[in-house]
């Protein structure tokens, strides 16, 4: 039995409210669950922030025994400081800063700037020495 940590939707139309549940992966979203671990309200409150309440000890327990968080809950747990950032957060936003370092086409490794600068100086130096010997 694989245990998933996921959100179960409550609330009415256009006003979602979620409970954080530990449930069997085969049970439906709003179906039978093993334990309620907290809540998440995505609508901003009076202070303008999203409200969230989690039982951190129980969440850590379920993660330690191998429960797998769903993607939305993984982002929530990252904001709460329980998990490392998901891969898409670490990559940055679309249209953001791009990596412009040169890449070796044969190996796919990133060439360091020191090596590329040394190569250009050494090739320039060889041309200068060749030019000096030919005249």
Image: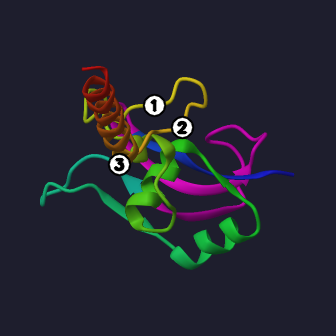
The part of the image, by quadrant, that contains residue 59 is bottom right
Q: How far apart are marks 1 and 3 (CA)?
A: 13 Å
Residue receiving disc 2: 109
**Would you say residue 14 is visible in this rendering?**
no
Indicate yes or no whether the magenta region holds residue 18: yes
Residue 123, given in percent of the width and then of the height, sits at: 35, 31
**Would you say residue 29 is visible in this rendering?**
yes
Mark nearest the camera among 1 and 3 is 3
Residue sitting nearer the eye, 106 or 34: 106
Q: Name the residue located 25 percent from the left edge and 33 percent from the top edge.
A: 96
Residue receiving disc 3: 114
Most extreme residue toward the front is 135
Mark nearest the camera among 3 and 2 is 3
Q: How far apart are marks 3 and 2 (CA)?
A: 14 Å
Q: What stretch is highlighted in magenta?
A: 12-39
Residue 126, given in percent of the width and then of the height, sits at: 35, 32
Residue 120, given in percent of the width and then of the height, sits at: 32, 34
Residue receiving disc 1: 103
Most extreme residue toward the bottom is 57
Q: Is 111 placed left or right of 120 in the picture?
A: right
> Within 10 Å of the Cα at label 2, are there few (<14), some (14-19), or many (20+) other Cα atoms?
few
Residue at disc 1, secondary structure: loop
The part of the image, by quadrant, that contains residue 89 is top left
Whichever of callouts 1 and 3 sits on the residue coming sooner in the sequence is 1
Q: Is 91 placed left or right of 1 in the picture?
A: left
Residue sitting nearer the eye, 87 or 128: 128
Residue sitting nearer the eye, 21 or 105: 105
Q: Name the residue located 54 percent from the left edge and 48 percent from the top edge.
A: 7
55 lies above or below 37: below
């Amino acid at each position: 039995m694989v245990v998933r940590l996921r959100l179960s939707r409550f609330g009415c139309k256009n006003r979602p409210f979620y409970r954080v549940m530990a449930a069997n992966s085969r049970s439906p979203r709003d179906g039978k669950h093993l334990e309620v671990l907290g809540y998440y309200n995505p609508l901003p409150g009076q202070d303008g922030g999203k409200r969230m309440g989690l039982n951190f000890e129980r969440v850590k327990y379920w993660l330690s025994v191998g429960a797998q968080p769903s993607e939305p809950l993984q982002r929530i747990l990252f904001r709460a400081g329980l998990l490392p950032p998901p891969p898409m957060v670490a990559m940055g936003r679309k249209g953001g800063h791009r990596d412009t370092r040169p890449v070796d086409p044969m190996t796919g490794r990133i060439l360091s700037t020191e090596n590329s600068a040394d190569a250009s100086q050494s090739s320039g130096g060889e041309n200068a020495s060749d030019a000096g010997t030919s005249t």
